[in-house]
């Protein structure tokens, strides 16, 4: 009888052990897919983990902000270590493509800083995990999901596969000691350059800033943003005909440009140097706060200011996404939520930290947060958030951009216009 009891107890233990072991993979699988968990469980699973955040590392201010403000807050408040890995989109996309081909289920990248053509490429190659945006509390609370530059990334539908991180907007910069009334439209710019020959130019395409300058002109002269609906395929010949007013404009302005338009600055950095050296009176940027920072650094006089056109200037949003094989999706979600907190967004807006425009909808912020925002000095040359937002135009589909740049080279450089 005792032997039988021992056998039964042994079987019971073995069966219990088998039952426990068989449920463990199911539980692990649930933990690996936070979409099946509530937010408290996600935070609990993320505690004590490390989030590998892959991002462009070319700006020391941004790097320092992530390494200090973000990393310190995440460790203190959530017990999460943020490991910033400086790597550009081309590199980390190639890495993810390689892991996809190798069927690597757990990769080393937990979160990426991404937007535009890179996001489109990543989505089309199934390199991103999601949709996860609706799982992020601060996204639900503070973001305008229907805004064109939130719902679409350079025209490509986001569909919850990334959450906004911050915003950029095209602005012009000028020195008030030399320019009393900066041009506020394509027509005013043409008149200004005729009155001030040799004092204006723009970067040669495909420079990112030169390209957005051309698209701003295109909006004004060729029917606006609405004239370029979302598409995945662009007919070059059809687009060329549509852009004829733009080519006519470049023909009219060319002879009045710096060096009579026979050559162009190779990059926006080269244009900025011409501006700093006094060779041209107007420059341009995608970062509205950068010139305030340069004034504080003593690189530019405190008479420099920025401006937008009356009909608006193009802005875009940069985002955070989670790779398909991120090993720490829970931690990535908690980090994304922190990045969308008013605390982080206000800190990021500080010019000394970054000067990046907020990704949050101001209408969703509490009055106290609005006061905090108004209390931040964006810098002497930086336009207010309200003025930028009321003059913000969306980007067109990413598919248009390389075709426009190719046509510009053919119509402006090769044709001699």
Image (cartoon, rainbow, N blue to C red):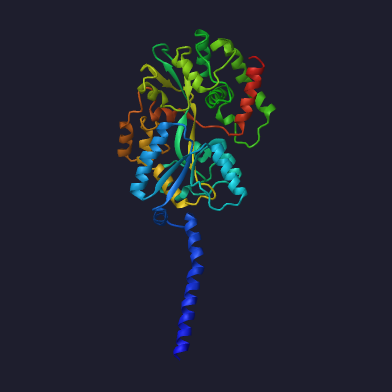
Residue shown at 49% from the left, 52% from the top: 327
Foreground pick, 8 / 317: 8
Image-quadrant location for residue 406: top right
Foreground pick, 332 / 211: 332
Q: Is residue 407 visible?
A: yes
Q: Is residue 183 visible?
A: no
Where 1 falls versus 229 (above or below)? below
Where residue 71 appears, as percent x and y from the top left, is 38, 43
Where 271 falls versus 119 (above or below)? above
Where's the C terminus, which quadrant? top right
Where residue 243 appears, as percent x and y from the top left, is 63, 23
Where 244 falls versus 9 (above or below)? above
Image-quadrant location for residue 242: top right
Residue shown at 30% from the left, 35% from the top: 371
Foreground pick, 285 / 91: 91
Q: Residue furthest right?
A: 237
Callout count: 0
Residue shown at 54% from the left, 50% from the top: 325
Foreground pick, 197 / 371: 197
Residue shown at 64% from the left, 28% from the top: 403
Where's the N terminus, which quadrant? bottom left
Where residue 138 appears, as percent x and y from the top left, is 40, 46
Where residue 80 appears, as percent x and y from the top left, is 39, 49
């Amino acid at each position: 009888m005792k032997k039988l009891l021992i056998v039964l107890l042994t079987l019971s233990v073995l069966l219990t052990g088998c039952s426990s072991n068989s449920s463990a993979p199911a539980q692990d699988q649930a933990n690996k897919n936070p979409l099946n968990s509530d937010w408290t469980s996600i935070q609990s699973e993320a505690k004590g983990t490390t989030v590998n955040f892959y991002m462009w590392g070319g700006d020391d201010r941004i790097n320092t902000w992530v390494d200090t403000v973000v990393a310190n807050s995440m460790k203190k408040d959530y017990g999460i270590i943020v490991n910033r890995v400086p790597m550009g989109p081309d590199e980390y996309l190639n890495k993810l493509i390689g892991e996809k081909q190798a069927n690597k289920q757990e990769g080393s990248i937990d979160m990426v800083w991404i937007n535009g053509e890179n996001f489109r490429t990543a989505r089309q190659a199934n390199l991103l995990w999601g949709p996860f945006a609706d799982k992020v509390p601060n996204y639900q609370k503070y973001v305008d999901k229907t805004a064109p530059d939130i719902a679409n990334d350079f025209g490509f539908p986001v569909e919850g596969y990334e959450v906004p991180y911050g915003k950029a907007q095209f602005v012009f910069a000028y020195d008030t000691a030399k320019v009393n009334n900066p041009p506020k439209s394509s027509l005013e710019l043409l008149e200004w350059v005729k009155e001030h020959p040799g004092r204006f130019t723009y970067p040669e395409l495909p420079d990112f800033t030169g390209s957005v300058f051309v698209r701003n002109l295109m909006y004004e002269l060729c029917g606006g943003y609405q004239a370029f609906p979302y598409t995945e395929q662009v007919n070059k010949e059809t687009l060329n005909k549509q852009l004829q007013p733009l080519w006519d404009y470049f023909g009219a302005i060319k002879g009045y440009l710096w060096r009579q338009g026979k050559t162009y600055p190779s990059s926006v950095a080269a244009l900025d140097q011409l501006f700093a050296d006094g060779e041209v009176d107007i420059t341009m940027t995608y970062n509205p706060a950068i010139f305030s920072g340069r004034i504080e650094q003593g690189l530019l006089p405190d008479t420099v200011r920025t401006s937008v056109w009356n009909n608006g200037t193009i802005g875009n949003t940069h985002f955070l996404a989670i790779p398909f094989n991120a090993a720490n999706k829970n931690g990535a979600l908690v980090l994304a939520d922190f990045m969308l907190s008013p605390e982080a967004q206000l800190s990021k807006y500080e010019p000394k930290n970054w000067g990046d425009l907020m990704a949050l909808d101001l209408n969703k912020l509490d009055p106290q947060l609005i006061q905090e925002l108004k209390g931040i000095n964006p810098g002497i040359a930086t336009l207010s958030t309200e003025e930028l937002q009321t003059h913000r135009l969306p980007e067109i589909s990413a598919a248009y951009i390389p075709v426009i740049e190719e046509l510009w080279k053919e119509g402006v450089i090769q044709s001699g216009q």
